[in-house]
Amino acid sequence: MKAILLLSAIIISLLLWSSSVQAQDGERNSPIYEELAAQGRMTTGEITDVYGVPCVEVMLDNGETIKTLVDSIPSLKKKSLMVMDRIALINKTHYLLTVNGRGNMSTDRDKLFVPLDYSIEPKILPEFLSGAANHEKYILIDLRQQYLGLYEWGELKHCFPISSGTYKRMPIKNFVVHRMDQVHNSTKYDQAPMDHALHIGLDYFIHEGIVPGYPASHGCIRLFPLHARFLFYDWAKPGIPGKIIDRG
């Protein structure tokens, strides 16, 4: 009996391995993979699963952006806006940030994951959050993954990349949006702009700012301006509850 079970397990493993190899072979034959390879863009050519999406890692030169990358690859350029948004989402950045650029539009990230299949939605945050099921609206902030999720009656409706604090853990775990300031300046850091701000307790806010793909703030939660303004004008209101998790 043990021999039969062992043989069955081996057969299942071989079938799963064979399916995985066939899937990877199919991705390597895709126009996106071939065009990236032809331009010498890929770091290794290995296909990696990123949030459930098959991806390859590519290099960006100084002065490049996700937009310039997409514009240089014919298969990506055909549907450029959706592609740029997807690449930016899974890399926690913005498609206009420049590698080693200047000022607020700069990032030092020169390696990015590029999806090979845009029909697959990335699975970043839980699609359903039981703790939010009784709330009309609920905000989940995942510090380890650097994403913010907007939930309605427990269902994930929007997922945005963030940049959180660099040097200390957020002391707040459960919060409520206390107030919303269209224009706000820091009282601790040289009047730094923190517009479209949601106060979530103590000295902490969710506000618009630079999101370079990694933690970079003094402690608040930064969103891209477009996302912060959607949150401020179209979605949030005082009294909305939320939770901050850090599984790192």
Image (tube, rainbow, N blue to C red):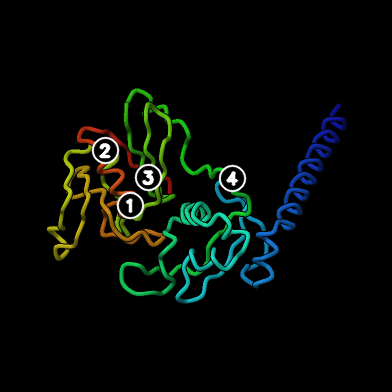
What separation in Å lies between label 2 and label 4 (alpha carbons)? 29 Å
Q: Which residue is mark 2?
A: 236
Q: Amino acid at mark 3?
A: Leu
Look at 26% across and 48% down and name the residue there: 206
Q: Which residue is mark 1?
A: 226
SS label for mark 2: loop
Residues packed near mark 1 inside 10 Å, few (<14), some (14 to 19) or many (20 plus):
few
SS label for mark 1: helix
Sequence-first disc among 2 and 4: 4
Residues at marks 3 and 4 touching, judged by CB atoms closer than 8 Å: no
What separation in Å lies between label 2 and label 1 (alpha carbons)? 14 Å
What separation in Å lies between label 1 and label 4 (alpha carbons)? 26 Å
Q: Nearer the viewer, mark 2 or mark 4?
A: 2
Sequence-first disc among 3 and 4: 4
Residue 74 % position (x, y) = 62, 63
Q: Nearer the viewer, mark 3 or mark 2?
A: 2
- Indicate the quadrant where residue 12 lies: top right
Residues at marks 3 and 2 touching, judged by CB atoms closer than 8 Å: no
- Indicate the quadrant where residue 3 lies: top right
Residue 54 % position (x, y) = 63, 51
What separation in Å lies between label 3 and label 2 (alpha carbons)? 13 Å
Q: Nearer the viewer, mark 3 or mark 1?
A: 1
Q: Which residue is mark 3?
A: 148
Q: Which residue is mark 4?
A: 52
